[in-house]
Image (spheres, rainbow, N blue to C red):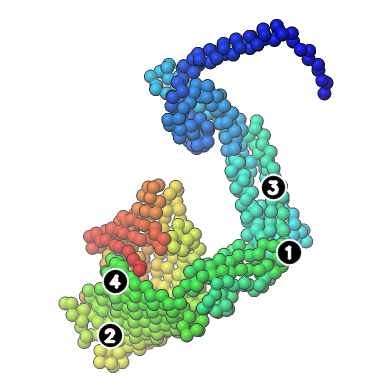
Amino acid sequence: MTARRHDAAPPVSRAVAAGCVLLGLMLGGCASLQPDAQATSMPASAAPADVIIEAPEELRALLDRHLDLARLARDAAGETLTDSELRRLVNATPAEARALLATEGYMDADVRAEREDAALSTRVRPLVRIRVRPGARTQVESADLRVVGDLADAAKRGDTQAKALINEWQAAWRLPPGAAFSNTAWRDAKSALIARLRGTGYAAASLLSSAAEVDAGRARATLSVEAASGPLFRTGPLMIEGLERQDHKSVRNLADFEPGTVATDALLLDYQERLQGSGLFERSTVSLDPDPAHAETATVTVRVKEAALQQATVGVGISANTGPRISLEHVHRNLFDWRATLRNKIEWGNRRKAWEGELASHAMPGLYRNLLGGGAERLDSDTDRVSSVRARVGRSYDTQRIDRLVFVEAERVRTWPVVAGVLANATRSDTLSATLNFHGIWRDLDSIVLPTRGDSYAVQTGVGQVHSTDSDGNSTQGSGPFARVHLRGQWWRPIGERWYAQARLEIGQVYARDNVEVPETQRFRAGGDDSVRGYAWRSLTPQVAGVDVGGRVIGTASLEIARPVSESLPSVWWAAFVDAGRAAARWNDFKPAWGAGLGLRWRSPVGPLRADVAYGEEVRDWRLHLSVGIAF
């Protein structure tokens, strides 16, 4: 640094200089008191300007949400804004808008901001008009996805599973050639790519590098991503926290996997859902230790909060099928310190009175459960009464997607005709049957409680022997063997925007000689809420001497479309439907009854609650169908 020497000014020069400085300060002060010619055109107390954005709808929403000028005009009513501040914001708007549009893939947008003063029009406030021509949106031209680490090494060694996993991983990429490019889509695609790798057992997978090269002139983007898989994680010891009364073995059996199993997200999530679905716990979580150093034997930690040892539930409800009802259910989740759950339920209604009981073991290896159950039921209609008592022993297999039940059942069924409102005891029928049965359900649904996409298939089969007696206890010619098959399929699909379709098909048949008196509970009846709407419950069935009897064949079908009532009420839907079907003595007598109508749905957390008004073509009348329940 060079130092410079300054000579002292003579005394007279200092006095003159001081006077000049003083005069300058005085003139400056006076100038500061003069109004700014520009400021006079926009008083300091003026409100912010109005802003109009001329752009495609989705881009207009983006700019309105993020542009400084638009946010000020929308959210800062009453705040001061001088003319110079407004001019600065207007001048900055095109560059700010182009930067925002670039995040959505519009790299060559033309943006203009034009100001219209209030003094030049009848407007109270100035108007700023922002005109946007976004130009071509950038599309992905190519995407290079690479993985290094243990997964890549296994694929190089010829591991077919590793090769298939890499192919599936690359195929799941969310920005394939031709896809629209944006910063948000780019970020989400990379996150999903790593999450998918972690979910397949590589819990320590990470992003090594990524690049997006955008050619603004051609509106094309070239992408590249490199991920490190890390080691493949396998399950090790199971650590269980939170148990007080339940047995560790019940929790371990629900895992249904051995140490050394590849620790995928699906494996752990299915385990967590089985714990929750067991009824033993209020909540449960399953997590994996992600430390790569212990990948070969990663600890699986299970945290549970047990449900109450005993629980009683009172329910009050009403349905078009059985009318008003009250129910009481009791559950004991560890009876006599056995690994077993005891359930008892009593229901009392106008048309149905029933008791159901079951003692079921907690999950055993392979997710099987042994069960012992029984029940008693009385069903009343205008033309008959059906009373039954049954006992069963069997084994079940229950998962989120598959339920299977194999059981042997003994059942006694009595049927009384109702003539002029009085039971005709003299013509009562009495059957005692023993059957071997299989029930199965296969589900592939986006939600078990509130499905909108997926399929569900149910099958019931049984073979057995029936012994029939008359009202005096004498054996009849109605004894003999019989078999039963009942199939039911349901489908849910979204169609278009915010429209949903649901279809159902049911078919069943009893196989027996004509003179064999098949138990009434093994036959079929149609009509009612979950069958053919527009008709009374169990009314679409054959009659003998004016008395309803169960049919030996059944066929029903339903088609329904629905959509939310409004965007502000997404859980309330309206629906239109058509149903058809009936039960008959034989297929030669089958002629479907038709019903159609409109309904409302409330998609509550416990399932859809429905109110339908249906017109029955055969009865030429309207019928209200309700399914509503309240649990305390």
* Residue tagged 2: 429
| Distance of label 3 from label 4 (alpha carbons) | 61 Å
**In front here: 28 or 110?**
28
Nearer the observer: mark 3 or 2; the answer is 3
* Residue tagged 1: 293
The percent coordinates of residue 486 (x first, y second) are 41, 73
Secondary structure, mark 4, is strand
- Amino acid, disc 3: Val
In the rendered structure, find residue 32 and report the number of the disc placed on it. Answer: none
Sequence-first tag of 3 and 2: 3
Is there any visible trace of residue 572 in the rendered image? yes
Nearer the observer: mark 1 or 4; the answer is 1
Q: Is residue 37 left or right of residue 167?
A: left
Sequence-first tag of 3 and 1: 3
Query: Residue visible at 39% across and 83% down?
Result: 374
* Residue tagged 4: 325
Q: Is residue 448 left or right of residue 294?
A: left
**In front here: 61 or 117?**
117
The percent coordinates of residue 172 (x first, y second) are 62, 52
Q: Mark 4 and mark 1 in contact (Cβ < 8 Å)? A: no
- Amino acid, disc 4: Arg
| Distance of label 3 from label 2 (alpha carbons) | 75 Å
Q: Is residue 147 above or below residue 252?
A: above
Secondary structure, mark 3, is strand
Quadrant in the picture for the N terminus: top right
| Distance of label 4 from label 2 (alpha carbons) | 28 Å
| Distance of label 2 from label 1 (alpha carbons) | 72 Å
In the rendered structure, find residue 225 and report the number of the disc placed on it. Answer: 3
Nearer the observer: mark 2 or 1; the answer is 1
